[in-house]
Amino acid sequence: KDENGSPPPPSFKEIISTHPTENGWKVFQHLCFYQGFWCFPLHLKGAMFAQHHFKAQATDVFLCSAPKTGNTWLKALSVAIVTRNDNSNNNLLLNKVPHECIMFLEKDLIKNPTAQSDEGRLPLVATHLPYTALPKSILHSGCKMVYICRDPKDAFVSLWHFARGKSNFGPYWDHVLGYWKASQENPEKVHFMRYENLLTDTISEVKRLAECLGYPFVRIEEKQGAVEKLVNLCSLQNLSSLEINKNGKYGDAERGINNNVYFRKGKIGDWMNYLTPEMGEKLDNIMEEKLSGSGFTF
Ligand code: A3P
């Protein structure tokens, strides 16, 4: 048995060969359907590794999201919140793309299994895994989670720009519902956020996020404008103008992702520039059907 008390997993090759696969928009990589969600083999390997070897600390907070729903922003804000009084780390966002500031569960752990016990690592871990696929130790350790969701039409258009590709970690409705239900059952542990609220009511949302992360702003900080300062630091305009995000790369120096692709428009309703009202309505109807009875609507 592994660290999470589960029997050893079947080999990765076995899984890949027995589960349905389909082409994503990234035509050079297919998607594999595993435990109810679509995943690139590379991430799936990392996800399976994390499911069997990750040991959550009770003090960790998990930043969870489906792709293109605002996780770069959520990471930036959370990093800025937890490091704001920490001299050794408070320039982190100026030198690294937000994705490199914290551990990405299904990507980083398999590359560096000891990363989880690195002294000095921030108490934040990011994941795109659906709620039902999280390593058991996350659910058992009692650690907190923050989930961010976004209007599926904007997330869809954002993904199209990013990958020219299809929805990995989807279906999106299942992704949202898993965390929505968990937040309803356990609001103290699972903090549910919407990109749109973060955009329209940034200050209050960031204060609530700081409380959830266990780093609330104290009155004197608020008086001195610390919340506004942090919000400005993490704004799309500021982050996208930093040298590291303009010209830097995330991951592998040659094949890595250009950091600038993580920052595009950051608007509500950009889908209207790409989808017809009929296409939007079609997507709305699918969502309505899939979410019906859950108490959640976009
Ligand atoms: P658009 O493509 O609609 O502009 P993710 O971070 O989950 O990949 O999501 C990407 C979306 O978040 C992109 O949306 C991107 O522009 C937006 N985004 C990135 N950083 C942001 C920030 N600091 N503030 C607001 N939106 C941000």
Image (cartoon, rainbow, N blue to C red):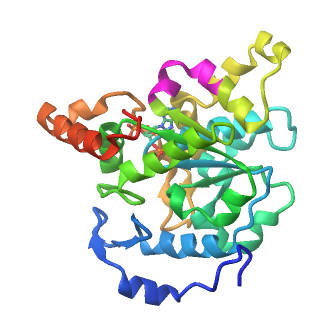
The location of residue 227, given as percent across then percent down, is 70, 20
The location of residue 173, given as percent across then percent down, is 37, 48
* Frontmost residue, 247 versus 182: 182
* Frontmost residue, 270 versus 61: 61
Query: Does residue 2 appear left or right of residue 120 in this picture?
Result: left
**Residue 73 in magenta stretch:** no
- Magenta range is 196-206
Is any atom of residue 162 visible in this view? no
Residue at 29% over, 65% down:
24
Q: Count the marks.
A: 0
Relative vertical location of residue 274 with respect to residue 27 in this rendering, above or below: above
Relative vertical location of residue 34 with respect to residue 56 in this rendering, above or below: below
Type of secondary structure dominating the magenta stretch = helix
Query: Does residue 74 appear left or right of residue 270 in this picture?
Result: right
Location of the C terminus (image quadrant) = top left
Q: Residue furthest top?
A: 223
Q: Indicate the quadrant where residue 279 lies.
A: top left
The location of residue 238, given as percent across then percent down, is 57, 29
Q: Indicate the quadrant where residue 74 lies.
A: top right
Is any atom of residue 258 visible in this view? yes
Residue at 58% over, 65% down:
106
